[in-house]
Image (cartoon, grey):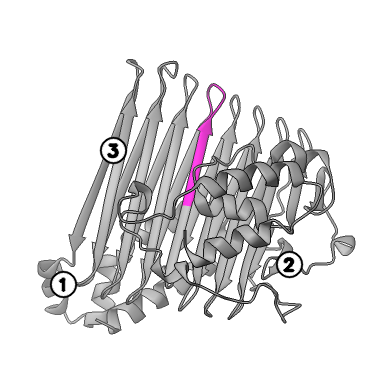
Amino acid sequence: MSQWLAQVIERAGNVDDWLASARSKALAELKQKEWPGRRTEAWRYTSLHKVADLNLATTSKETTAEAPQVEGLNSIDLVFVDGRLTSDMTNLVLPEGVTIASLDTKNDAAEYLFGQVKPQHHLFGLVNDVLAQQGVVIDIAPNANVEQPIRIVNFASDGVESHQRSLVRVGEGAKAVIIEHGVGNGHSLNTAFAEYDIADKAALEHYRLALHEGEAIHVGGSHFRLHNESKLNSTLVGYGSQLTRLDVDIEHAGEHAFAKFNNIYLLAPKEHFDLHSTIEHAQPNGTTAENARGIIGDKAKAVFNGRIHIHRHAQKTLAELNNRNLLLTRGAQINTKPELEIYADDVQCAHGATVAEIDEEALYYMLTRGIDKQQALVMLNFGFVQELLFQMPNRALADWLQPILKQRFERMMEQQ
């Protein structure tokens, strides 16, 4: 056991709130977990030695922060600073059918969701279970059509360890837009996990922005349970930072459920980004389309592990998984592992992965026609990431992200 994990277990013993029963169960499981090493398959390409002896403050001096402005987004913002909710919930003007509560207050939605959607296979997920004392519970009433996005902003400050939790229930026939927006660049450790239960014929438009940079360490996950004829359209955009690890789990628990999951990652020098996705098709007639595209520069390292599991009962499933990567240098690295595990016999499934370098012939062609090299590289290589941005339903968010990602890509090219 690492020094850090021993401290976590000691601190967890002092947490006493209305979720004590669930936390006690998670703590018992956490005590049985081994510290992940190179022989642990899920962490094979991601070293945790920078976490093992970490000793950061567990309280923060920061009490407020302004959510990043996104022109035209008009979102309801819930702002967390180092795991503490700083938004004044009493002043929120909520659309009809929306209820928002703090996790530290007992309510039936939190009781229904906490620990029920997120698989208990992740050591850091268990750490979040036992230490995330503050969080948000969002309950969308049946048949509510909530067009205004709800944004959960999670700041991680320099020198602080923090844990944040989100629970979302989308009622039958309802529609909602949720954005998880993480930010941090100091020497910090932040875990942020979210659980979503999407009822029959409900639809969720979801975004996760893991825009941590520099010395930040961020570990988190978004976990979804889809019921009959429900729909999920999710986009994940991530940087690498010192260490970023994200897990996304989508469970088709009902028939005729639909899930679209796009993800983009851009890694600057020496950054590390690790994405694990698991799609469980447990019922018939489900559809999944997952597209992951990454650009890795200098000596950055990316890990992609995508798994689609078709259960024996899940006949008529349509599922596709694709991971494409562009390496800007010979020092950049991607370990990609798309997996299909199929037990039903009447399904249509496909998966694939590509790793490519800059097309020198195409670049030469553009240079000979007088196009500046930097501009030519952007035109040639940023396009396949941009394609996923164009697919985002929320145009305000896509228009805000596009220049940010383009500038980051241009900086990555200059650093080669």
Q: CA distance from mark 3 to mark 2?
A: 40 Å
Expressed as whole percent of the image width and height from the top left, the position of residue 260 reads 47, 41
**Magenta stretch, residue numbers:** 247-257
Q: Is residue 119 above or below residue 177?
A: above
Q: Is residue 18 left or right of residue 250?
A: right
**Tag 3 residue:** 351
Contact (CB < 8 A) between labels 2 and 1? no
**Tag 1 residue:** 363
Q: Residue at x 61, y 44 (%)?
A: 28
Q: Quick check: can you spot residue 210? A: no
Expressed as whole percent of the image width and height from the top left, the position of residue 127 reads 59, 55
Q: Is residue 125 left or right of residue 14?
A: left
Graded by Cα atoms within 10 Å as few (under 14), some (14 to 19) or many (20 or more), the crowding at tag 3 reads some
Image depth: mark 3 or mark 1 in front: 3
Residue type at the position of mark 1: Leu
Q: Is residue 270 above or below residue 90?
A: below
**Tag 2 residue:** 84
Residue type at the position of mark 2: Arg
Q: Residue at x 18, y 82 (%)?
A: 370
Q: CA distance from mark 2 to mark 1?
A: 49 Å
Q: Nearer the viewer, residue 301 or 283?
A: 301
Expressed as whole percent of the image width and height from the top left, the position of residue 259 reads 49, 37
Q: Residue at x 30, y 38 (%)?
A: 339
Upstream in sequence: badge 2 or badge 1: 2
Residue type at the position of mark 3: His
Q: Secondary structure at mark 2?
A: strand
Expressed as whole percent of the image width and height from the top left, the position of residue 8 reads 60, 61
Image quarter (top left, top right, bottom left or bottom right) of the C terminus: bottom left
